[in-house]
Image: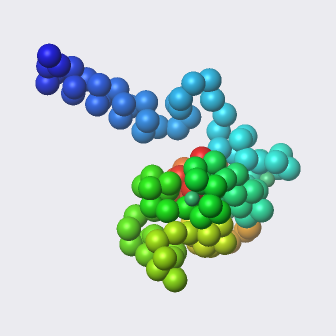
Amino acid sequence: MISRRSILVTLAVATISGGSWPVSAGSRQRTPIQTFDTDNDGTLDLTEVKRAASALFARLDRDHDGTLDKHELAGRLSPKEFAAADPDHDGTLTLDEYLAVVEQRFNAANPDKDGTLDAKELNTSAGRALLRLLR
Ligand SMILES: [Ca+2]
Ligand SMILES: [Ca+2]
Ligand SMILES: [Ca+2]
Protein backbone atom coordinates (compact mmCIF):
# COMPACT_ATOMS: atom_id res chain seq x y z
CA MET A 1 0.00 0.00 0.00
CA ILE A 2 1.24 3.45 -0.87
CA SER A 3 0.90 5.95 1.93
CA ARG A 4 -0.38 9.43 1.30
CA ARG A 5 2.88 10.77 2.68
CA SER A 6 5.00 9.00 0.08
CA ILE A 7 2.74 10.30 -2.70
CA LEU A 8 3.22 13.83 -1.42
CA VAL A 9 6.98 13.40 -1.24
CA THR A 10 7.02 12.04 -4.79
CA LEU A 11 4.97 14.98 -6.01
CA ALA A 12 7.24 17.45 -4.24
CA VAL A 13 10.35 15.90 -5.77
CA ALA A 14 8.77 15.90 -9.21
CA THR A 15 7.84 19.56 -8.80
CA ILE A 16 11.30 20.56 -7.71
CA SER A 17 13.12 18.62 -10.41
CA GLY A 18 10.71 19.58 -13.16
CA GLY A 19 10.11 23.16 -12.22
CA SER A 20 13.45 24.88 -12.47
CA TRP A 21 15.88 25.14 -15.33
CA PRO A 22 18.59 23.90 -15.82
CA VAL A 23 17.90 20.87 -13.63
CA SER A 24 16.52 18.53 -16.25
CA ALA A 25 16.38 14.87 -16.98
CA GLY A 26 19.59 12.91 -17.38
CA SER A 27 22.89 14.51 -18.16
CA ARG A 28 21.49 17.41 -20.15
CA GLN A 29 22.75 20.40 -18.20
CA ARG A 30 22.94 22.77 -21.15
CA THR A 31 20.97 25.99 -21.12
CA PRO A 32 18.43 26.58 -23.91
CA ILE A 33 20.83 29.04 -25.50
CA GLN A 34 23.69 26.54 -25.47
CA THR A 35 21.38 23.94 -26.96
CA PHE A 36 19.82 25.97 -29.78
CA ASP A 37 22.32 28.80 -30.48
CA THR A 38 23.79 27.36 -33.65
CA ASP A 39 25.70 30.53 -34.63
CA ASN A 40 27.11 30.84 -31.08
CA ASP A 41 26.34 34.53 -30.65
CA GLY A 42 24.92 33.99 -27.17
CA THR A 43 21.30 34.64 -28.16
CA LEU A 44 18.52 32.88 -30.04
CA ASP A 45 17.13 34.44 -33.20
CA LEU A 46 13.93 33.42 -34.95
CA THR A 47 15.75 31.18 -37.43
CA GLU A 48 17.38 29.20 -34.62
CA VAL A 49 14.11 29.00 -32.72
CA LYS A 50 12.20 27.77 -35.79
CA ARG A 51 14.86 25.18 -36.51
CA ALA A 52 14.55 23.84 -32.97
CA ALA A 53 10.75 23.92 -33.19
CA SER A 54 10.80 22.03 -36.50
CA ALA A 55 12.99 19.34 -34.96
CA LEU A 56 10.62 18.99 -32.02
CA PHE A 57 7.63 18.90 -34.40
CA ALA A 58 9.18 15.93 -36.20
CA ARG A 59 9.83 14.15 -32.90
CA LEU A 60 6.31 14.78 -31.63
CA ASP A 61 4.66 13.58 -34.84
CA ARG A 62 4.54 9.98 -33.70
CA ASP A 63 2.29 8.74 -36.50
CA HIS A 64 4.34 10.61 -39.15
CA ASP A 65 1.29 12.10 -40.85
CA GLY A 66 2.91 15.53 -41.04
CA THR A 67 0.61 17.12 -38.49
CA LEU A 68 0.33 17.30 -34.71
CA ASP A 69 -2.95 16.55 -32.97
CA LYS A 70 -3.72 17.46 -29.37
CA HIS A 71 -2.51 14.10 -28.14
CA GLU A 72 0.86 14.48 -29.84
CA LEU A 73 1.20 18.05 -28.53
CA ALA A 74 0.81 16.69 -24.99
CA GLY A 75 -0.36 19.92 -23.41
CA ARG A 76 2.13 22.27 -25.06
CA LEU A 77 -0.78 24.44 -26.20
CA SER A 78 -3.86 25.28 -24.16
CA PRO A 79 -7.21 24.38 -25.80
CA LYS A 80 -7.70 28.07 -26.55
CA GLU A 81 -4.26 28.43 -28.13
CA PHE A 82 -4.84 25.26 -30.11
CA ALA A 83 -8.15 26.56 -31.49
CA ALA A 84 -6.51 29.86 -32.46
CA ALA A 85 -3.60 28.04 -34.11
CA ASP A 86 -5.89 25.72 -36.08
CA PRO A 87 -7.91 28.08 -38.30
CA ASP A 88 -9.37 25.30 -40.43
CA HIS A 89 -10.53 23.48 -37.26
CA ASP A 90 -9.49 20.06 -38.45
CA GLY A 91 -8.02 19.21 -35.05
CA THR A 92 -4.43 19.10 -36.22
CA LEU A 93 -1.59 21.57 -36.70
CA THR A 94 0.65 21.53 -39.76
CA LEU A 95 4.27 22.56 -39.38
CA ASP A 96 3.39 26.01 -40.74
CA GLU A 97 0.61 26.43 -38.18
CA TYR A 98 2.94 25.26 -35.43
CA LEU A 99 5.69 27.64 -36.51
CA ALA A 100 3.19 30.51 -36.57
CA VAL A 101 2.54 29.91 -32.86
CA VAL A 102 6.28 29.68 -32.28
CA GLU A 103 6.76 33.05 -33.97
CA GLN A 104 3.99 34.63 -31.87
CA ARG A 105 5.61 33.35 -28.69
CA PHE A 106 9.02 34.49 -29.90
CA ASN A 107 7.70 38.03 -30.39
CA ALA A 108 5.94 37.95 -27.02
CA ALA A 109 9.22 36.99 -25.38
CA ASN A 110 11.16 39.72 -27.21
CA PRO A 111 9.76 43.02 -25.95
CA ASP A 112 12.86 45.00 -27.00
CA LYS A 113 12.29 43.81 -30.60
CA ASP A 114 16.01 43.42 -31.27
CA GLY A 115 15.47 40.18 -33.20
CA THR A 116 17.08 37.98 -30.58
CA LEU A 117 16.26 36.41 -27.24
CA ASP A 118 18.87 36.54 -24.51
CA ALA A 119 18.98 34.39 -21.38
CA LYS A 120 16.99 36.96 -19.42
CA GLU A 121 14.21 37.09 -21.99
CA LEU A 122 14.08 33.29 -22.14
CA ASN A 123 13.66 33.17 -18.38
CA THR A 124 10.42 35.18 -18.40
CA SER A 125 7.06 33.42 -18.50
CA ALA A 126 6.77 34.33 -22.19
CA GLY A 127 10.23 32.92 -22.79
CA ARG A 128 9.40 29.70 -20.99
CA ALA A 129 6.17 29.40 -22.99
CA LEU A 130 8.27 29.57 -26.14
CA LEU A 131 10.74 26.97 -24.86
CA ARG A 132 7.89 24.51 -24.34
CA LEU A 133 7.50 24.49 -28.14
CA LEU A 134 11.21 23.80 -28.70
CA ARG A 135 11.98 20.85 -26.45
CA1 LIG B 1 22.25 32.79 -32.11
CA1 LIG C 1 0.67 13.30 -36.31
CA1 LIG D 1 15.55 40.65 -27.29
Q: In the rendered image, which quarter is residue 53 located in?
A: bottom right
Residue 11: name its quadrant.
top left
| Image location of residue 51, percent across then percent down | 75, 57
Q: Residue furthest bottom?
A: 88
On-image quarter of the N terminus: top left
| Residue at the image position 62 percent from the left and 61 percent from the top | 65
Residue 134 screen position, x and y as percent: 62, 52
Identify which residue is drawn at 50% across, 54% down.
72
The residue drawn where x is 77% and y is 48% is 37
Task: Tell me if I can see residue 35 in this picture.
Answer: yes
Q: Residue furthest right?
A: 39
Tell me how many marks there are.
0
| Residue 124 percent across, percent down from the top left | 51, 55
Q: Measuring 52% from the left and 83% from the top, which residue is drawn there?
A: 88
Residue 109 point in image, percent of width and height: 58, 64
* Quarter of the view holding residue 101: bottom right
Q: In this view, does 31 lie to the left or right of 6?
A: right
Q: In this view, does 127 lie to the left or right of 15?
A: right
Q: Nearer the viewer, residue 62 or 24?
A: 62
Task: Give above or below for 88 relative to 10.
Answer: below
Colour style of the rendered protein structure: rainbow
Q: Which residue lies furthest to the top in this view?
A: 1
Whether residue 124 is visible: no
